[in-house]
């Protein structure tokens, strides 16, 4: 299955470029970098000068796919252990930018 905006949440996200679009924490809004690890509730983001832990809940992300497409995803859709999220059925709550 190729990575596309429709199936982004069911794929491995480590290695993708990500930008924090909105967050309840204004200090992380606008941060961008490459995802280096993922837990149930957070992403580890390599923001160039340091690795930051970004919460998924109450945050909106923009992912850049390998083909250059940008996809907005609500973090609440991604709250799950990565191995469980990949195998479960997802509702369509993502939008292509």
Image (spheres, rainbow, N blue to C red):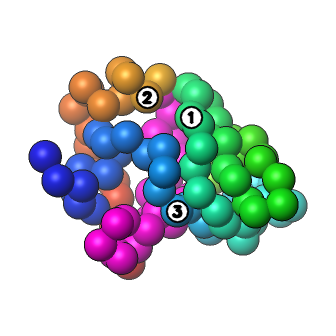
The residues bearing labels 3 and 2 have C-alpha atoms spaced at a distance of 17 Å
Extent of the magenta region:
60-80
Q: Pointer 1: residues within 10 angstroms few (<14), some, or many (20+)? A: some
Q: Work out how far the residue at label 1 is from the one at label 3, CA to CA, in angstroms.
A: 13 Å
- Checking the image for residue 17, the label placed there is 3
Q: Earlier in the sequence, mark 1 or mark 3?
A: 3
Q: Nearer the viewer, residue 91 or 30?
A: 30
Q: Identify the residue at image location x=40%, y=73%.
A: 70
Determine whether the residue tagged by mark 3 lies in a helix, strand or loop: strand
Q: Which mark is residue 38?
A: 1
Give percent across and percent down for residue 76.
Answer: 51, 42
The stretch drawn in magenta includes residue 29: no
Please tell me how crowded label 3 is: few (under 14), some (14-19), or many (20+) other residues with Cα within 10 Å: many
| Label whose residue precedes the other's in the sequence (1 or 2) | 1
**With respect to residue 88, does 59 lie above or below?**
below
Examine the rendering and report whether any part of residue 77 can be seen. no
Q: Which mark is residue 20?
A: none
């Amino acid at each position: 299955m190729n990575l596309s905006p429709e199936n982004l949440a069911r794929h491995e996200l480590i290695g993708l470029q990500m930008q924090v679009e909105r967050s309840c924490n204004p200090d992380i809004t606008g941060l961008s970098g490459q995802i280096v690890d993922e837990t149930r509730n957070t992403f580890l983001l390599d923001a160039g000068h340091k690795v930051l832990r970004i919460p998924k809940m109450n945050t909106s992300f923009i992912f850049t796919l390998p083909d250059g497409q940008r996809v907005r995803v609500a973090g609440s859709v991604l709250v799950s252990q990565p191995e469980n999220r990949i195998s479960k059925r997802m509702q369509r709550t993502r939008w292509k930018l």
